[in-house]
Image (cartoon, rainbow, N blue to C red):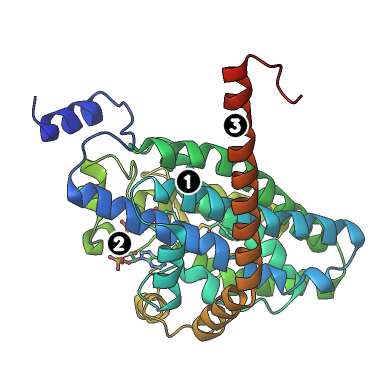
Amino acid sequence: MTAEERFQSIIAAEDKIEPADPMPDGYRKTLIRQMAQHAHSEVIGMQPEANWIARAPTLRRKAILIAKVQDEAGHGLYLYSASETLGPGRDQLQELLHQGKHKYSSIFNYPTLTWADIGAIGWLVDGAAITNQVMLTRTSYGPYARAMVRICKEESFHQRQGYEALLTMSRGSDEQKAMVQDAINRWWWPSLMMFGPHDADSTHTKESMAWKIKRVTNDDLRQQFVDMTVPQCEFLGMTPPDPDLKWNEERGHYDFGEIDWDEFWRVVKGDGPMNRERTARKVKAWEDGAWVREAAAAHAGKTAAREAAKRAAKRQDDKRGEPHGV
Ligand code: FAQ
């Protein structure tokens, strides 16, 4: 069996491709691109919410938000580790992000203007992320699929806390209700953009579906998200900002309006409301944290040297037949 045949047989059998398995160059490249983008999104995605940690309205909300932002850092780490199994180190991937050569999700280039934005991010942004990531638990690359299982469990907590925050506000004062509607108005369309371009305009979907990296297409995931989210929005007593949104009895789905694709591509290409700030802050955090990385590496080096000395001493003791540690 050739390497290509072995790869195809694993894919056809719905087994997982593992790091040492043969894989076509394109498969490896596509995975590195997507997983790195995903990792970068988790890390940059901490910024919009971190903006509100110091201003959370209660201690409970502050504790929840800190835990959530910390989870996102953890997700970034799982994903960089999973990417490392394909070759590139995390420093190398972050360098590409800092140089603007790697993308991250368009959604994180919008500002968080009010406290309701934090609820909207949890409900809509994490909601869109889960819709996409549940299908990725079945992706064909083993380390990515396993990372996704853990991440999805945490994202589902994130989504609920966001919805609960909005539900509380939507049962509050007129001012609070208006704040919730305003946040929905601003986050609705960018959340729909998270799923990427229409299938017909998607560069990678066809190949990624054949390789079972993606298991559902951009448009189908977007439709799933709209179908799930509209009734939740109604339960809040709010209205999605889409005059074309309408239940279609025949299709058994909601019809919805067209995304502003000019805006989407502008944001993807670096010209969104917050692109420059987000990247500059990420680069600064990386530079400011250099001493921590150096200290951690020095500590790891010392620990490794101590362990090596212990092993050498044990070997000597074994040779002399003496009990260890005497
Ligand atoms: N933003 O051919 P396709 C989170 C690019 S969740 C920016 O359809 P593909 C959790 C795409 O890269 C958010 N760029 O691409 C959280 C490609 O350009 P390239 C992250 C986008 O890969 C919540 C070009 O357009 N989730 O962070 C976007 O097959 C709250 C053509 O597109 C993931 O990354 C976009 N929205 O499908 C954290 C999930 N859409 O690379 C904090 C994993 C498309 O050729 C707080 N990723 N592009 O130059 C995926 O499932 C896929 O990569 C898609 C795009 C579905 C995003």
Q: Quadrant of residue 38?
A: bottom left
Residue 10 position within the rendered picture, expressed as x and y whole percent measured from the top left: 24, 27
Residue that mark 2 sits on: 198
Residue that mark 3 sits on: 311
Residue 244 position within the rendered picture, expressed as x and y whole percent measured from the top left: 45, 66
The kind of residue tagged 1 is: Gln
The label shown at residue 154 is: none
Picture quadrant of ligand 1? bottom left
Residue 47 position within the rendered picture, expressed as x and y whole percent measured from the top left: 63, 71
Seen in the picture, residue 5 relative to 245 is either above or below; the reply is: above
Residue sitting nearer the eye, 245 or 286: 286
- Is ligand 1 closer than 8 angstroms to the Cβ of mark 1? yes
The label shown at residue 133 is: 1
Residue at position x 40%, y 79% in the image: 99
Secondary structure, mark 1, is helix
Q: Nearer the viewer, mark 2 or mark 3?
A: 3
Q: CA distance from mark 1 to mark 2?
A: 18 Å
Seen in the picture, residue 297 relative to 103 is either above or below; the reply is: above
Residue sitting nearer the eye, 133 or 97: 97
Q: Quadrant of residue 67?
A: bottom right
Residue 169 position within the rendered picture, expressed as x and y whole percent measured from the top left: 81, 63
Secondary structure, mark 2, is loop
- Is ligand 1 closer than 8 angstroms to the Cβ of mark 3? no
Q: Is residue 298 visible?
A: yes
Q: CA distance from mark 2 to mark 3?
A: 58 Å
Residue extending farthest right: 59
First-in-chain label (2 vs 3): 2
Residue extending farthest front: 320
